[in-house]
Image: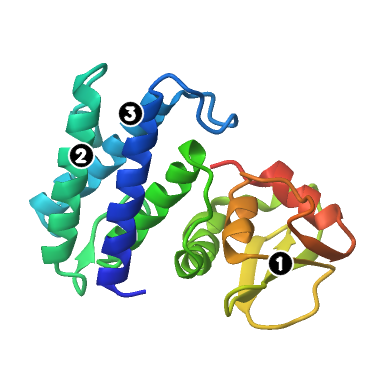
């Protein structure tokens, strides 16, 4: 995706998340979080704050996370979130995406910020408003999860298995062969046979990969389901 694509979806999902919170501030978000919609909005707002603060500081110095403010509560929260989301979009629009930037994941290309902002906001928007995630963003989100987050999963979390999962998006051009084993997670793009194949929309595959949804009627499964269970047990971010 390009910068404009990320920004369009960041703004749309920020607005949808804010609307869900305003509609029912104390309604529960996705049950796996244990939060209500206000706590969820505060969390996303604090992620936005970290990003826009880093972008304001520049690429030469990493921000002090401990110095960041926390989200306000009560009636001040929605307007604080809205203003922060707008500022983040403006800073992403103006940033140097070709520079190398400091992040919690180590030095990263500037594209880290528009991508992570859009992905974080989209999944958490789903937590409050469970409508499908944009298909192109979902394909990109699976790539991001496998590239950025999966390497943090230790191999011993998979119970000694050495197996593979083929993910196949049915509504977009997207296929991945994900290897799970003692060395952790590695993946490759393309059509290949795994020990199990999981077929579904890109949105559903992304939500499954983030452990938001179970393997149910929205998916087709071919092969041994045990690698899917191993993923579900191991993936905790």
Would you identify the image quadrant in which residue 180 lies?
bottom right
**Closer to the camera, 207 or 51?**
207
Residue drawn at x 30%, y 75% is 2
Specify few, some or many for label 3: CA neighbours under 10 Å numbering under 14, 14-19, or 20 or more. Answer: some
Mark 2: which secondary structure? helix
Q: Tell us which disc is closer to us: 1 or 3.
A: 3
> Residue 82 has which mark?
2
Residue drawn at x 47%, y 36% is 128
User: x, y (%) of residue 89?
Assistant: 19, 55
Q: Which residue position is annotated with label 3?
A: 22
Specify few, some or many for label 2: CA neighbours under 10 Å numbering under 14, 14-19, or 20 or more. Answer: some
In the displayed orientation, state which residue is furthest to the top: 74
Q: Which residue position is annotated with label 1?
A: 179
In the displayed orientation, state which residue is furthest to the front: 23
| Cα–Cα gap, marks 2 and 3 | 11 Å
User: x, y (%) of residue 77?
Assistant: 24, 25
Q: Is residue 67 left or right of residue 131?
A: left
């Amino acid at each position: 995706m390009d910068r404009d694509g990320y920004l369009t979806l960041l703004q749309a999902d920020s607005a949808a998340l804010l609307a869900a919170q305003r509609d029912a501030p104390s309604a529960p978000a996705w049950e796996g979080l244990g939060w209500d919609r206000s706590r969820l909005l505060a969390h996303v707002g604090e992620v936005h704050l970290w990003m826009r603060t880093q972008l304001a500081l520049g690429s030469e110095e990493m921000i002090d996370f401990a110095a960041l403010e926390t989200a306000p509560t009560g009636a001040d929260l929605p307007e604080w979130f809205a203003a922060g989301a707008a500022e983040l979009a403006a800073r992403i629009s103006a940033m140097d995406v070709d520079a190398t930037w400091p992040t919690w994941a180590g030095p990263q290309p500037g594209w880290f910020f528009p991508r992570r902002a859009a992905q974080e906001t989209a999944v958490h928007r789903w937590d409050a408003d469970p409508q499908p995630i944009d298909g192109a963003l979902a394909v990109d989100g699976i790539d991001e999860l496998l590239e950025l987050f999966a390497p943090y999963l230790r191999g011993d979390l998979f119970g000694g298995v050495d197996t593979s999962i083929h993910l196949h998006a049915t509504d977009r051009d997207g296929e991945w062969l994900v290897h799970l084993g003692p060395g952790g997670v590695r993946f490759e793009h393309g059509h290949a046979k795994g020990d199990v194949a999981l077929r579904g929309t890109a949105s559903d595959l992304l939500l499954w990969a983030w452990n938001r949804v179970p393997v149910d009627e929205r998916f087709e499964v071919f092969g041994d389901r045990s690698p899917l269970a191993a993923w579900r047990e191991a993936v905790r971010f």
